[in-house]
Image: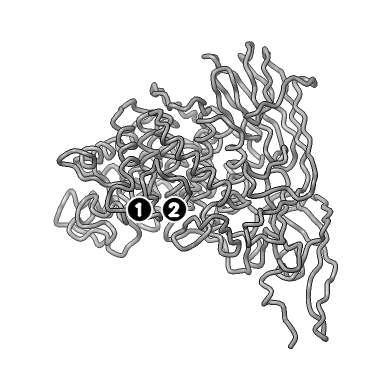
Amino acid sequence: MMKRITILALAAAMTLSVPAAKKQQQSHGYPINPVPFTSVKVAPGTFWGQRLEASRQVTIPLAFSKCEETGRYTNFSNAAEHMKDPSKVFKVNGIGFSFDDTDPYKTIEGASYILQTYPDKKLVAYIDSVLDVIASAQEPDGYLYTARTQNPDDPHHWAGPTRWSTVEILSHEFYNLGHMVEGAIAHYQATGSRKFLDIAIRYADCVIREVGPGENQVQRVPGHQIAEMALAKLYIVTGEQKYLDQAKFFLDLRGKTDRKDKYSQAHKPVIEQDEAVGHAVRAAYMYAGMADVAALTGDQDYIKAIDAIWDNMVGKKLYITGGIGATAHGEAFGENYELPNMTAYCETCAAIGNVYVNHRLFLLHGESKYYDVLERTLYNGLISGMSLDGGGFFYPNPLESLGQHARQPWFGCACCPSNLCRFIPSLPGYVYAVKDRNVYVNLFLSNEGTVTVDGKKVALSQTTEYPWNGDIAVTIGQNAAGQFALKVRVPGWVRGAVVPSDLYAYADGKQLGYSIKVNGQEAGTLSEDGYYTIDRKWKKGDKVQIHFDMEPRTVRAIDLVKEDEGCISVERGPLVYCAEHPDNDFDLTKMIVNQKPAFSVSDGKVLEYPVKTIATRAQALDFDSEGRLTAKDVQLTLIPYYAWCHRGSGKMKVWLPQALMAVRPAKELPVKE
């Protein structure tokens, strides 16, 4: 067993500097370079600083503790014991899932990201001890899958009788590989250590030897995608062409094996697909992998397909919260415009996948519309999946509740909590990007970053209270002397576009303004890509002052979305708002919002966490003793959607009735006989 380091000790911040990885990397193929997470430090005590701090103090220690408590580490130790003494076998049927190995991998990935903001030598040592246990379970040829190795003659009931025999259905052997590689690369980039990377490379090499087009190989595709984008990333880190070839092999073979169904996006070859279908997480991971392979190979058919799929998703299948996946049946996309609220699935993992897809399409095309979708997802349907203190989770993220939902401290199928472990600390890698002499400012949060322009490192810093107000100051730091273009994203919500399609539209007729100045002077123009571009010779101390008008807006869905007919949603800046039971002493299912609502914005709190609340007038509906419908004037208070269900289970609504026909479920009104 591994040497134990207490989970509480992991939360103590240390002052040891963590060395950055030195490996020379291959080009990632995208025209635009993301500024890596290792180059951006988020300011503590801010909106995102608090989220990172919660990850460090609560979520990541909790995830590691759950790996201990639920036998994730024991699976590796048991596999090692069997390899040492084949007479020792362990019961695995019916215990856990075939993908439980990924929870340590994902948690190590998140811990590696967090080390950049909060260096911690005890955390580094703990990860090393976990890696010792993981390494002990790797078979001599590199295969690492504890669901089989613990008891090869009677493996997990999803694993199949032999390697890869059920990988297209339930074994998740390639899914495990994908998360292993993703975690190993993050650990390598954060620490410079190859310890995890070498484990992952050995497993990847095992897969490449045994799965492929050769005479003595089996031809299989991942049942649950992620290996595709992980292998593309492994190619970038190592420069080994075989990893990119394997990623493309997995994608090109899809729809050509025994697995041919929409649920797994295998109903047709990927280059012929033009609609977002099936299991939403698997789909998003595959679309992200397609973008990676397209960027690295220049395959235009891939680009054409992923663009068409994105158009379908954003135009017909995207929730106002940025969530994807309409139905619990198959955790899947619904039909076009099928966007139910009460039964919306919107899995947290799917929101993370949606961020991956839009980030990659931005890197490919350079248009702000992809970050508009990314930001909407990030601030609403993604962070809603984790409680403000980092210790409670949602698997699905519905847009309406009657009280049947509650945040959970963990799940038996822990994919969402462990996925949040790895995503939230990776946020610094989404803030900036560079192309040639263009520096993109894509997200607005207080931070200090370093970007490389024309071979020279340039320091940037942001100061802001975004998303609570629209004022951002970007200060140019050291080594700034030189000509380059600073491209500041002007969000769609400022420019009057809810999303980059006609699926939703603002309903209030307002036009928001904005201003962007350098040292107090106008200095740039808004270009067609959605960025305000300031091209000048910069010097240290130059300050870019950004102001976006930020006030409540009302939104309507296109008429084809029947669930939202007669309703409005309310948002302010990037945040979608909802009405929740603790703030409103009337039945939220029996109320109607004014036809011309006026809003007031106030400082408030959800538990001890500060938020901006929105208030407006509404009418609570009921029947009197004679059976006549009555309406009572009430104040309706709204909070940010991500903050709901922190104060007990109860009723919640994102879409608010503005017409009587939209008061649903109408059958709940006590109709008089």
Give neighbour class at mark 1: few <14, some 14-19, many 20+ (Cα, 10 Å): many
Q: What residue do we see at 32% from left, 63% from top?
A: 95
Residue type at numbered disc 1: Phe
* CB under 8 Å between discs 1 and 2: yes
For residue 584, say whether it is visible. yes
Kindly state the secondary structure of the residue where label 1 is placed.
loop
448 sits to left or right of 216: right
* Residue 415 circle label: 2
On the image, the x and y values in percent for residue 554 come to 75, 51
Q: Which residue is mark 1?
A: 99
Kindly state the secondary structure of the residue where label 2 is placed.
helix
Q: What residue do we see at 33% from left, 53% from top?
A: 260
The front one of 9 and 403 is 403
On the image, the x and y values in percent for residue 270 come to 39, 43
Give neighbour class at mark 2: few <14, some 14-19, many 20+ (Cα, 10 Å): some
Task: Determine the image quadrant of residue 42.
Answer: top right
Q: Does residue 183 lie above or below 585 as drawn?
A: above
The front one of 257 and 242 is 257
Residue type at numbered disc 2: Cys
186 sits to left or right of 603: left
What is the C-alpha distance between the residues marked 1 and 2? 9 Å
Q: What residue do we see at 77% from left, 41% from top?
A: 550
Q: Does residue 658 lie above or below 321 as drawn?
A: below
On the image, the x and y values in percent for residue 182 come to 40, 39
For residue 137, say whether it is visible. no
Which residue in the rendered view is the most extreme toward the bottom? 673
**Quadrant housing the C terminus:** bottom right
Q: What residue do we see at 44% from left, 42% from top?
A: 287
Q: Between disc 1 and disc 2, whose residue precedes?
A: 1
